[in-house]
Image: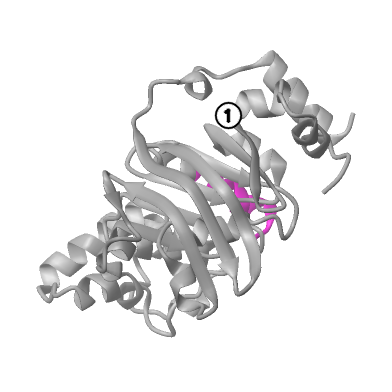
């Protein structure tokens, strides 16, 4: 049995109740979003409702627009001169492209990248950096934030005795969880993750996936992944992107067991991608 067939069989046998929730509150509402790099259009009329305190996975082949879309949710694409965007992205009732407060947005909508991109400083200072930049100077308060963030990222017990050591001395999996803790320290509502485990070994990947299951109790999470088994394991809903469009968006159980579009079925069963 192939891996994709195994995933399909898993969902035919066991549809977890958490994957069948239909009454979630919309946290992010995207309406008719189009994005251009110069004259080249990369996203076409993307519309999607992302539910609060769920994990939404974005899947699709390389170059299909999923990472580009992810970066629109905290306006990271603003950093590219040639980008032009129209449509609406509404977070908690506010159209983020009509607001000029991008710093506030990126505090509310944090991001974890493919590589941990930690600063060349101590573990403590990596976590405390954001709060310090936002005016928190009290040592006791910073210590509390650092501990709470590292606990939330399920790595406190591994690093509590080496907080003054360089974060770059940690393993790749530990660095990624510290990067997640650094994001948590800013107390965001939403956390975006762009293939956060693609550079990790299987054991580290499992630890991050277990962490995600805990984190969605407190955060709305949107994750880009090339790994369909990962999408099946961790997400509540899945959006399948192809050529800059959302082809299908539904509960993950339905995407992997009974997709409505033939292209979705062809992708999740490994016929292309």
Q: Nearer the viewer, residue 101 or 52?
A: 101
Query: Is 225 left, or right, of 122 in this rendering?
Result: right
Q: Quadrant of residue 220?
A: top left
Quadrant of residue 166 within the rendered picture = bottom left
Magenta segment main secondary structure: helix
What residue sits 65% from the left and 47% below the top? Answer: 245
Q: Is residue 251 left or right of residue 93?
A: right
Q: Residue at x 66, y 59 (%)?
A: 198
Whole-percent x and y of residue 223? 54, 49
Is residue 40 in the magenta section? no
Name the residue nearer the viewer: 44 or 179. Answer: 44
Q: Which residue is mark 1?
A: 250
Q: Residue furthest front?
A: 39
Rendered location of residue 74, percent (x, y): 40, 61
Location of residue 209 in the rendering, given as x and y in whole percent from the top left corner = 55, 45
Residue 115 left/right relative to 161? right
Mark 1: few, some, or many residues within 10 Å (few <14, many ≥20)? some
Q: Which stretch did the figure color magenta? A: 200-211
Q: Secondary structure at mark 1?
A: strand
Image quadrant assignment for residue 171: bottom right
């Amino acid at each position: 049995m192939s891996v994709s067939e195994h995933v399909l069989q898993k969902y035919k046998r066991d549809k977890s109740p958490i994957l069948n929730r239909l009454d979630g509150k919309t946290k992010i509402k995207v309406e008719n979003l189009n994005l251009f790099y110069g004259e080249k259009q990369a996203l076409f009329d993307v519309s999607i409702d992302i539910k609060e305190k769920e994990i939404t996975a974005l899947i699709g082949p390389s170059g299909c627009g999923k990472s580009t879309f992810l970066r629109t949710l905290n306006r990271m694409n603003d950093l590219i001169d040639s980008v032009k965007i129209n449509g609406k992205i509404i977070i908690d009732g506010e159209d983020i492209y009509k607001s000029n407060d991008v710093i506030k947005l990126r505090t509310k909508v944090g991001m974890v990248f493919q590589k941990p991109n930690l600063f060349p400083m101590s573990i403590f200072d990596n976590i405390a950096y954001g709060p310090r930049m936002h005016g928190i100077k009290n040592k006791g308060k910073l210590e509390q934030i650092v501990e709470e963030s590292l606990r939330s990222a399920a790595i406190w017990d591994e690093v509590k005795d080496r907080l003054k050591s360089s974060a770059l001395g940690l393993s790749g999996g530990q660095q990624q969880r510290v990067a997640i803790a650094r994001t948590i320290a800013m107390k965001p509502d939403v956390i975006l993750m762009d293939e956060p485990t693609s550079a990790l070994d299987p054991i580290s990947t499992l630890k991050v996936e277990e962490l995600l299951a805990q984190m969605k109790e407190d955060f709305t999470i949107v994750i880009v992944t090339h790994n369909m088994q990962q999408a099946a394991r961790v997400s509540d809903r899945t959006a399948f992107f192809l050529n800059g469009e959302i082809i299908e968006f539904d509960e993950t159980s339905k995407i992997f067991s009974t997709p409505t579009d033939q292209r979705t079925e062809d992708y999740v069963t490994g016929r292309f991608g």
